[in-house]
Image (cartoon, grey):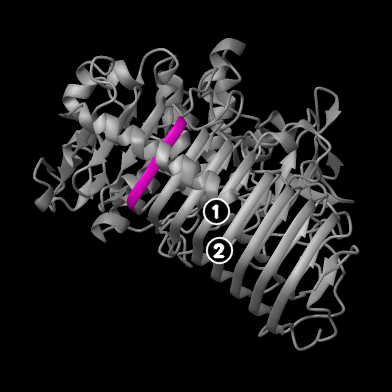
Amino acid sequence: MEDYKAEIKRRELQDMMQEFEDNGKISWSEFYSDSILHRKKVVEVYNNDFSNGTLRITQPCVFRVMENISFNPNRPTTWLDSNDSITSDFSKAVKIDPNRLLDWKPNETQSNNTHDYMTGDMKFAYSLGFFAAITVESKDVIIDINGFSIEQHKEHYLQQRFFSVIELADQPFISNQGPANFGKTVKSANNCLIMNGNIGLSSHHGIHGNNCNNLYFENLNFANFEVAAISINGSHNIWLRNCKIIGNNKSIPVLGTYSGGRFLRDFVEHAKTISSLQTNLITSSNNLENDLNETFNEFIFNNGTTPSYIKNISGLIDGNTYGILFNPEGVAVESPLSNRDSHKANEISNVYMENVSINGIDGNIVEVLGIINSNGSVVDTAGSLLRWDEINNDGKYNGTNLSDTQIELARYVDTLDDNTKKAFGTLNIDKGIMEWKDNEETYLKVDNNKLNLYYRDDILEIDGIPVSYDIICNRDTMSHINKGVIGFKIDGVNSLYMCNCQVNNISNDGVNGSEKIGSYLYGSPQQTGSLIGYNGDKTYGFMLSAINDAKINNTYVTDIRSKYSSAVGFCLQNNSHNVTIKNIKITDINSSVDIDLDISKSFLPNLPPNSKAIYISSDTFNIKLKQLLYSNINNNQLLNIYNPVYIGVLINSE
């Protein structure tokens, strides 16, 4: 039945493509000039068409790529040569121009930028730069990559740290989510086919979408993304056939702090248009700008020094990374869906995957300890946590140019009215943190899982209230809850069919979580359900949570590794039910095999390493498991008593 449905959909899309072919071929400039007049035609697209920004598909068409695309819009026209003189000849450039007019972002001096990206809701959607090479904002769109490749140019890749090669909507977030205000409503794709080509280098996703329906992906290869090859949230009717994920990027030059710095730079530039800046903000932001430029110079010209708080020594992503991610509506930054009792369980449905493989996903997840202030707000700027533990020298403030700018920008924004403040996104650095930075006689100290600010021997009070913070754990730089490195991560899907799918070579080098607040089950209020203790060091081939009505046939999982923690081949959990798994082969699952363990340490937050071929939690029901084969399931040598198959509920098996 599932094969039949997929074939019917494929024929419908082929018929639609033939109709559009019969209507003729036009250039992107012709289509752009009057997209309503030229709707339902074939639009031929070349690299030069992207020179001024994102191509927004707003009417039905076949969008056909005619050559390899390297997305690098609005790059600077001025550089510095070896004499520190301005040159427009890039062949003579050795440094970025700190006074450049263009900065890879929308700019009113560039063709069509004001109309497309800087008016109405679009000025919010593009407030943090070009978030995609292509956006699909219409029904009945076919993207034919035509055997070519689409990717970020490495300059834009460094400078635009939130990006999807193809975004299936006119903005990357639903309302009231994300690091800034991206607009009130989302206009998403419906009835979209993407086929026949390669989707390459991206600082976040290959394909990303919210609330987009009737999607068909066929004959696609993905490589060199950071967060996920495909990430779809809150959508219905999704088909994937003959898709290969052949590895995420393993040469990432920067940590998440660079993204935070680029966001801050935009906010400081906006602040300059409102009023004069305080001296400390000018100084810190200039220093931060120099750090960002030095990072660019090292990456592009091999002629700079990246600061230690930005430089990524391992080259692996320092946050969660996935091959394919399906999720209910909204961002997938919190815990996996814990059950099917809420409306979230009906926000994504009818997912079909045939001949889909995920290979070579590696991560080195780094925990960032955050804090929550007395107002219940996470202390951050634009979603980037204030990394208090890393700028804490025996309790004293020892900041970076990033943290200095975060704090000074917050001090500036405090002087603005509430309506003007909205343009600066989430900005929750309070007066206690400002006092810690300003007063050398203050210091932070952990007391009974609280982080208190002391002045000499007493907890400091501001406006009669003691300055005290709750510490939150198991987070990355951008405040995402750490879940690990995962091949297929599927949450809340109602009706799932997978056939001939495989996962191979998934690894995580992330170390164990901090024990500064002792043992804990949940590191923050948003960490819930089965996500116990610290999870940034774990690895999964499959993680399926709160799914219903699933058939998974002919599945292969090989070479799943966690350097310091647990590895699981196939995980089915969180109230999942009505699931049939048939003919699954799992081999080479390795948990902390070569690491010396201290077995006297506390049981939490770092659970003992434990390899599982398959894990089925006790809150699942009506599970059928047939023809399971597993081999070479390896645990740490000090913990060799374990069960390679854990099934916490009665199932039908053969």
Asked whether residue 468 is drawn in magenta, I would say no
Res. 227 visible in picture: yes
Say the numbered circle drawn on residue 501. Answer: 2
Distance, label 2 to label 1, CA atoms, is 8 Å
Is residue 110 visible in the rendered image? The answer is no
Please identify the quadrant where the C terminus is shown. Answer: bottom right
For the residue carrying disc 2, how many other residues have a C-alpha within 10 Å: few (<14), some (14-19), or many (20+)? many
- Horizontal relation, residue 641 to residue 125: left or right: right
Q: Quadrant of residue 386?
A: top right
The residue beneath circle 1 is: 353
- Callout 1 secondary element: strand
Percent of width and height locating residue 376: 78, 31
**Residue depicted at 59% across the width and 71% down the height:** 556
Q: Which residues are magenta?
A: 190-197
Q: Dot 1 surroundings within 10 Å: few (below 14), some, or many (20 or more)? A: many
Contact, mark 2 vs mark 1 (Cβ under 8 Å)? yes
* In the foreground, 573 or 396: 573
Residue 305's quadrant in the figure?
A: bottom left
Mark 2 / mark 1, whichever is N-terminal: 1
Q: Residue at x 29, y 46 (%)?
A: 145
* Residue sitting nearer the eye, 568 or 43: 43
